[in-house]
Amino acid sequence: MHCTDRTSLPEGTFAMKTYVVTAALIVAFPIPALAGSGAYYVGLRLGGGYCMVMTHVPSPKKYKMMGKYGTRAEAQKAMTAMADCH
């Protein structure tokens, strides 16, 4: 049986495979976007004098961005070394 020979397949099989593949693609593509960018940011609160690690880019109206890091541990380590964050 060849895949191009649709006459030997039960009726609706080709359509069902198309729906299954389409559904799998719809589910698979947004998953990396939901996982986040994988970046961590250290932001210094304007007027408050404390820093925090964030998973989103700090708002320039409320925070001064002190750096972007690949992991939370890197961001926390860098934050403890920053004089402005104490």
Image (tube, rainbow, N blue to C red):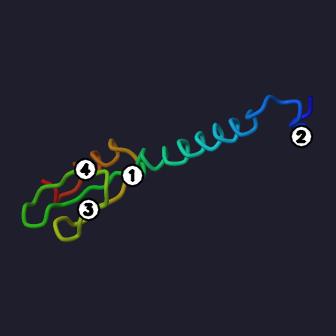
Quarter of the image for residue 46 reads bottom left
Residue 58 numbered mark, or none: 3
Whether residues under marks 1 and 3 lie with C-beta atoms below 8 angstroms apart, the answer is no
Measuring 25% from the left and 50% from the top, which residue is drawn there?
A: 53
Q: Residue type at mark 4: give it.
A: Val
Whether residues under marks 4 and 2 lie with C-beta atoms below 8 angstroms apart, the answer is no
The CA span between labels 4 and 2 is 55 Å
Taking depth in this image into account, of 16 and 45 the one nearest to the observer is 16
Tell me the residue that label 1 is attached to: 39
Taking depth in this image into account, of 77 and 1 the one nearest to the observer is 1
Measuring 49% from the left and 48% from the top, which residue is drawn there?
A: 30
Q: Residue type at mark 3: give it.
A: Pro
Task: Answer few, some or many: residues within 10 Å of disc 3's Cα (few below 14, many 20 plus, some between 14 and 19).
Answer: many
The CA span between labels 1 and 4 is 10 Å
Location of residue 84 with respect to 19 vertically, above or below: below
Mark 1 or mark 2: name the one nearer the start of the chain.
2
Task: Answer few, some or many: residues within 10 Å of disc 2's Cα (few below 14, many 20 plus, some between 14 and 19).
Answer: few
Which of label 3 and label 4 is nearer to you?
A: 3
